[in-house]
Amino acid sequence: MIESTGTKIDGKNAVVIGRSNIVGKPAALLLLAKNATVTVCHSHTANLKEICANADILVAAVGRAGFVTGDMVKPGAVVIDVGINRGADGKLHGDVNFEEASAVAGYITPVPGGVGPMTRAMLMKNTTQAAAMQNGVAI
């Protein structure tokens, strides 16, 4: 998803907010594998605003609607919002305050319609590949 923006990951500063085994840690490992310098933070990280403001790539997976505000985003950064939180209005909201962050970010994923559809597409791809492998079918 990041590479589709034309952004090179190699050598970039990446911050992942969230340390879960489902999203945070795997996202950090994927970025490390692409040679990013990765900082993993969470809601209790000291100086979180300053750390995020230096990120070329910011991944928000903290589980709190609107947690990441515009002043936490480096101008031109790629912001990946993995959060899905149902608000009091009944609508889905991400971990990033989209209105504020989109005014600063170079690229940002919306919620809904950003990471979710990509996740489902990759799940279908992996399921198809696994079924093909189990049945000796070449894809």
Image (spheres, grey):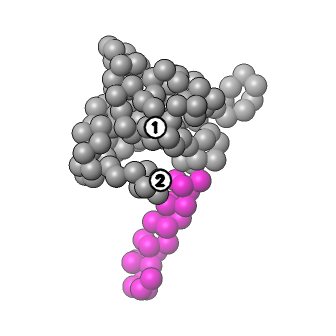
Q: Is residue 136 magenta?
A: yes
Image check: 70 left or right of 19?
A: right
**Residue 34 visible, this angle:** yes
Report which residue position mark 2 lands on.
Answer: 5
Element type at mark 1? loop
- Give the number of the mark in front: 1 or 2: 1
> Of label 1 and label 2, which has the lower sequence position?
2
Q: Residue at x 28, y 32 (%)?
A: 39
Nearest the eye: 116 or 102: 102
Question: Magenta stretch: residue 23 in it?
Answer: no
Residue 77: percent from left, percent from top: 43, 37
Q: Count the marks: how many?
A: 2
| Cα–Cα span, label 1 and label 2 | 12 Å
Q: Quadrant of the C terminus?
A: bottom left
Is 1 placed above or below 101 here? below
Query: Taking the image as drawn, is residue 24 in sight?
Result: no
For label 2, the crowd category at 10 Å Cα-Cα, with few meaning under 14, some 14 to 19 and many 20 or more, is few
* Residue 33 left/right relative to 126: left
Q: Residue at x 53, y 41 (%)?
A: 108
- 68 relative to 127, above or below: above
The stretch of residues the image draws in magenta is 117-139
Q: What is the three-letter code of the residue carrying label 2? A: Thr
* Residue topped by disc 1: 76
Q: Nearer the viewer, residue 40 or 36?
A: 36
Which is nearer the eye, 61 or 15? Answer: 15
Specify the amino acid type for callout 1.
Answer: Gly
Q: Are marks 1 and 2 in contact (CB under 8 Å)?
A: no
Q: Secondary structure at mark 2?
A: helix
How far across and how far down the image is residue 60, in percent?
Answer: 46, 33
